[in-house]
Image (spheres, grey):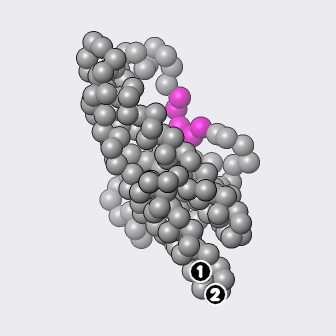
Amino acid sequence: NYPQNSEFGASLRDVAKILKYKQINGTPGSSIFSLERGQFDTHGTQLQVLPGLIDDMALSLRALIDDLITIGVWSNTVICLYSEFGRATAQNGPDIYTGSDHGGSTTMLLLGGGLNHTTSSVVGPIPSATDILSYTKMPLGVDFRNVFAEMVRFIGFDPDLIFTSPYVKQNLQ
């Protein structure tokens, strides 16, 4: 069940409806959907805002995953969650009503039955506690284009034809 009054949940439900329609009608080809879930730019009131945002996202994704399993397309699915900006490791004020400023890198979360990993895994360097405390902005560990290139390869395209700007290619396996 998708969360009530959730725009993100309603968007994911629409994705499931489209994929169900494609499955029922035997429509061939890969599908790529791009959705946005805003309001994470929490320079202030981070402790008050983030729990509700994360709950909405988690409940909406759980409902989508359940639908994709029921439809029979989960094994061919990759979901990528990412932010266009990272967060600084330090809060930007002295009290609990503060947040954090933009950072130098961010995280990506991949979900799906189409992934090669059978267990949870972390790809890229894992910063130590010392690193986290010493950096104002965490350095980039994996160029996002490497992750996107793997997703493009997953649906049968050559990423070199899409990502034409030079970047350091990393083995993510």
Q: Residues within 10 Å of mark 2 (few under 14, many from 20)?
A: few
Q: Is residue 103 left or right of residue 145?
A: left
Q: Which residues are magenta?
A: 122-126
From the top left corner, tell me how far across and down residue 65 is, in percent: 63, 57
Q: Is residue 109 left or right of residue 97?
A: right
| Residue found at x 46% / y 33% | 51
From the top left corner, tell me how far across and down residue 138 is, in percent: 37, 28
Kindly check if marks 2 and 1 are in contact, taking CB atoms under 8 A apart as contact.
yes
What residue sits right under mark 1 in the picture?
Answer: 21
Note whether 147 is above or below 22 in the view shown: above
| Residue found at x 63% / y 87% | 25
Q: Which is more toward the observer, 47 or 80?
A: 47
Q: Is residue 44 visible from the viewing direction of this image?
A: yes
Note whether 126 is above or below 173 in the view shown: above
| Residue found at x 37% / y 34% | 49
From the top left corner, tell me how far across and down residue 52 is, in percent: 45, 38
Q: Residues within 10 Å of mark 1 (few under 14, many from 20)?
A: few
Kindly give the residue lying farthest to the front in the view shown.
4
Q: Amino acid at mark 1?
A: Tyr
Q: Which is more toward the observer, 130 or 169?
A: 130
| Residue found at x 40% / y 68% | 162
Q: Which is more toward the observer, 32 or 19?
A: 19
Kindly give the residue lying farthest to the right in the view shown.
118
Question: Mark 2 falls on what kind of element?
Answer: helix
Residue 92 located within the stretch drawn in magenta: no
Q: Is residue 110 visible from the viewing direction of this image?
A: no
Q: Amino acid at mark 2?
A: Asn
Question: Mark 1 falls on what kind of element?
Answer: helix
What residue sits right under mark 2 in the picture?
Answer: 25
From the top left corner, tell me how far across and down residue 136 is, in percent: 31, 22
Q: Quadrant of the N terminus?
A: bottom right
Mark 2 and mark 1: span between their CA atoms? 6 Å
